[in-house]
Every structure is written in C-alpha cells, then in structure tokens.
Amino acid sequence: MDRPLLRRLPRLLRTRLPAQLPIHLPTRLAPPLRPSNPLPLPQRPDAHRRRLLAVGGAMLLPAAWPGLASAQSASPSPSPQQSVPRPSGSKPMQIGVIGSGRIGGTVGGLWVKAGYPVLFSSRHPEQLKPLVDGLGPLARAGTVAEAVAFGDVLFVAVPYGALPEIGKAHGRGMAGKVVLDANAYRHRDGAAGEDALANGIGPTTSKYLPGARIVRAFNFTSASDFATRHHQEPRIAIPIAGDDRAALDTASELVRDAGFEPVVIGPLKIADSFAPGGPLFRQVGSAEELRQKARAAVPAQPAGR
Ligand SMILES: NC(=O)c1ccc[n+]([C@@H]2O[C@H](COP(=O)([O-])OP(=O)(O)OC[C@H]3O[C@@H](n4cnc5c(N)ncnc54)[C@H](OP(=O)(O)O)[C@@H]3O)[C@@H](O)[C@H]2O)c1
C-alpha cells in the first residue's frame, strides 16, 4: 500500500490543489528518507492489553522526563495555573480525548502533566479507571458524548474505520471545534481506509467530521516515541497540517505543551506526506531537520486561512 501511495502523491496533490495556490511540485518525489526510528508498525493487541499499554505509556511519562518526575513528587497534581502559562484569570483549554488507547492515553497523559483538564473517553469508560487514577485529578473518564461536550479541543485517536460512525453519532457536537486527528488507516479500516487512500487522509477526515476544524497531528510516529521522547532537547518535531490558521495555532500550542516542537507542513491536502507511506513518516528529529526533509520531499504550500 505504501509504495503505490508514494508514487501517486504528486498526482494526488496536483489534482486536489485549488487553482489559486502557488504550486511547486517536483516532477518526482525524493526517495523515501530512511526512518530515524525504524520501528515496526505496532501490532493490534486485544482490548485489555491495549488499555494496559495506554496506562503503561502514561506511567512512562515521569520516568522519561526527570524534571517532571521531581515536580510530581513535590506536587502530584499540578494545578493548571502552575503548569500551563496563561494570561491571568484565563482558564486552560479543556481537552476531550476520543479513543484512549496507546496514542490517546499517551498524548492525553502528556497534556494532563502539562496542567490541562482532560476527559478520556471510550465506549467502555469504566475500563479507563487505571489510566485516569494514575494521572491525578485533572484526568477523568467518560463516554464519547461526554468528551465531545467537555472538550474545547478534541483529540481523536481511534481506528480510522471508526471515524464515519463517530461522525454520524457526534458530528454535530464536534462541528466548530478544533479537532486534532491522530488517526492512520490500515488494511483493517475498510471503506474509510480506501477513501483516505484514494482522496487523501486529511480531506477524508474532514468529510467524516464535517464542520470540525481538523488538524492532523501526533500520527507520524509511534505512541512509544511520544511516551519517551517528549521534552527531549532539542525538541522532537511533530509535523502538523490543517486548513484553519487559528486551529493550527491551537494545535501548535498543544504540541509544545506536550513537549514537542510543531512544524506546519501545509494544508490538509498534504497530510499524506507524513502518514504511513509518505516521505516524512517516522522522520523523528529536530524541527530544523524536519523542515529540511520537508523542503526536499514535499511541495511548498500555504497552510491555513
Ligand atoms: N499506536 C501507535 O503507535 C500509532 C501511531 C500513529 C497513529 N496511530 C493511529 O492512532 C489511532 C489510535 O491508535 P492506537 O494505537 O492508540 O489504538 P488503540 O490502542 O487500539 O486505541 C484505540 C481506542 O479507540 C477506541 N475506539 C475504537 N472504536 C471506537 C469507536 N467506534 N468509538 C469510540 N472509540 C472507539 C477504543 O476504545 P473502546 O474500544 O474502549 O471504545 C480504543 O481505546 C489509529 O488510527 C492509529 O492508526 C497509532
């Protein structure tokens, strides 16, 4: 699936670009860059093991961030005001996580550690108790509907094939909200995966979640990288893509507060460049390294309006 997508990327990008955007497409994409962290794609464990992995990822956070570990031992439940710098009197954003497995549990856990209130959701919220108990009072568990209502910003990390169903059930509540889309499609994802392969993953997510202000983020490498490499110096860069400038700004703030450096690659149409099979997938490194690789492999396009 990867190589055909890579071969088709220049054509897909050409056909999807609005005429007014300046396009500088190479006649041929650069060869795929060698991943700096060539981990195999994670296998899909059973539901119980997935939840344990998510809890394990959240548990790894203090160990991988000694500064945080010592701050935590002094204050196990950092207040939002302590951890997230805000103009005086303003409240931190509330984050609703839809899909609290390896990615949702790990990245949501980083936001809790940064001081954001996070509602982790699942179709079986009672099974999220170990995750939220381990994260302290800023974390709570609930249903998907509760996460949608709670979140000023939503983070969606479910199997890609679940997006159409989530859009049908919760699309109205998600419309108008900034939605960080961490999802990637695989063979298991059926029609939604085929749709994303044919039409681009960013536009396809937008189609399934109409009106949501989608930013593709936290999907270019493994959950274990996010669990262990946050707040590393120099910061690991996270490629993001979106069509809404304010949503990209919000996503950038959340990427920084999770302990990484955001690099805006372009509009949603170009998000395939850092999805599996794209030239920036698994290119784990600094912001400057990622920008250089993006300049070499991805056509320059303005992001956001
Ligand atoms: N793991 C990685 O390293 C990685 C890296 C990059 C991108 N991704 C992408 O991120 C997404 C999540 O991956 P993951 O590894 O975190 O998966 P996971 O561990 O299997 O977690 C997925 C979560 O989605 C929930 N879910 C499934 N179907 C749902 C539905 N219809 N409605 C609501 N929630 C639903 C599940 O909870 P319940 O069953 O309890 O509802 C589960 O907790 C996938 O699209 C994956 O391709 C993963």
Image (cartoon, helix red, strand yellow):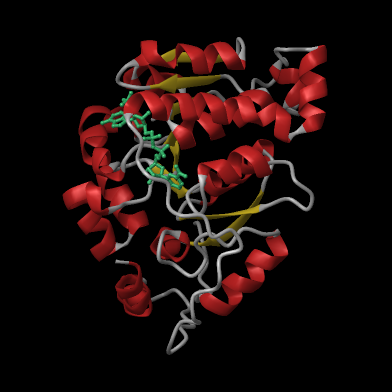
Residue 66's x, y, as percent? 80, 31
Q: Residue furthest left?
A: 191
Residue 133's x, y, as percent? 55, 11
Q: Is residue 54 visible?
A: yes
Residue 149 occupies quadrant: top left
x 72%, y 30%: residue = 63
In the image, is 180 to the left or to the right of 174?
right
In the image, is 7 to the left or to the right of 243?
left
For the N terminus, the quadrant is bottom left
Quadrant in which ligand 1 is drawn: top left
Residue 50's x, y, as percent? 40, 30
Residue 61 occupies quadrant: top right
Residue 124's x, y, as percent? 32, 16
x 32%, y 49%: residue = 206
Q: Is residue 111 visible?
A: no
Q: Is residue 63 above or below residue 163?
A: above
